[in-house]
Each structure stands twice: as C-alpha cells, then as structure tokens.
Image (cartoon, grey):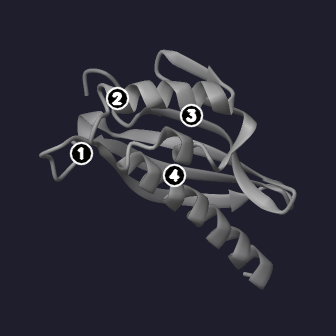
Amino acid sequence: MSDSRAEDEAAIQAVLADSYKAWENGDAEGMVAGYTADATAIMTGSLRDGREVIRESMALAFAGPLKNTSTQNRQLSLRFVGGDAAILVSESGVLFPGRTEVPDAAKVNATWVFEKRDGRWLVAAYHNSPVLAPGQ
C-alpha cells in the first residue's frame, strides 16, 4: 500500500471515529461534521437527504430514543474507487444503556461512500440494512 493510500485510510478512519464519538456524546452536529452538504442516509423506512436533514433527525433521536446510546462497529472492508472515492462496509449496532453487547437481531450491515473533496475525506452516502432477515 502506498503512503498516500495509507494516509487516505487513516483519514477515513478518523472521520468514522469522530462520528462515533459524537454519537456517544449525543452531539448531532459533531456526528455529521464529516458529511458532505449533499450527503444521503438511507435506513429502513427513511431517506435523509442532506447533511442538515441528517443532523436534525439525529438531534431528535439523541433527545429521545437514542439518548445515552453509543454504537458498536466492526469494519468488514474498505476499497478505493479511483482517486477520490472509497466504499467502506461495516457491521454496526446501537448499544443502549445498561447493555454490553448489541444483540444479533439488532445489528446492521452498513455501506459508507466516502468522497475526497478539497483534500478532505467526507461521507457522501450511508445505507444500512439488518444483518438478519426478518424471521431469522
């Protein structure tokens, strides 16, 4: 791996680490700080079109059902597409207060699309889907 590719990987990891830390702190603004203005987030039953919409929905969630939560995340793969795009796949889940593990039925596989804009890696799109199909 070239030094620049290693630097790109480290920069992408830093964006994720900052976003996860902001989630843990209930900080919606910090959570989307590494997102493009036109980022999209697709989760079961919702399309959040734009960083501001994502921020607003996360602020509501952090004040309500996701209050005092964190996430558990495991990177499954990272591949670069050209010089300014990358796709990261992870397994994630919300860790609710009092829990030490995310139940398998609550885990999701997530696809993160990163774009390098003005020398900075940012989340351009996010999508998740349950690891287990309903009924499994």
- The image position of residue 52, as x and y in percent, is 64, 29
Q: Nearer the viewer, mark 2 or mark 1?
A: 2
Q: Which residue is mark 2?
A: 63
Q: Nearer the viewer, residue 75 or 63?
A: 63
- Identify the secondary structure beneath mark 3: strand
- The image position of residue 115, as x and y in percent, is 77, 50
Q: Nearer the viewer, mark 3 or mark 2?
A: 2
Cα distance, mark 4 to mark 3?
15 Å
Quadrant assignment for the N terminus: bottom right
Cα distance, mark 4 to mark 1?
19 Å
Q: Who's the residue at 71% across and 51% down the image?
A: 122
Cα distance, mark 3 to mark 1?
19 Å
Q: Nearer the viewer, mark 4 or mark 1?
A: 4
Q: Is residue 21 left or right of residue 52?
A: left
Q: Earlier in the sequence, mark 4 or mark 3?
A: 4
Q: Nearer the viewer, mark 4 or mark 2?
A: 2
Quadrant assignment for the C terminus: top left
Q: Earlier in the sequence, mark 2 or mark 1?
A: 2
Mark seen at residue 102: 1
- The single residue placed furthest to the left in the displayed view is 98
Contact flag, marks 4 and 1 (Cβ < 8 Å): no
Mark seen at residue 127: 3
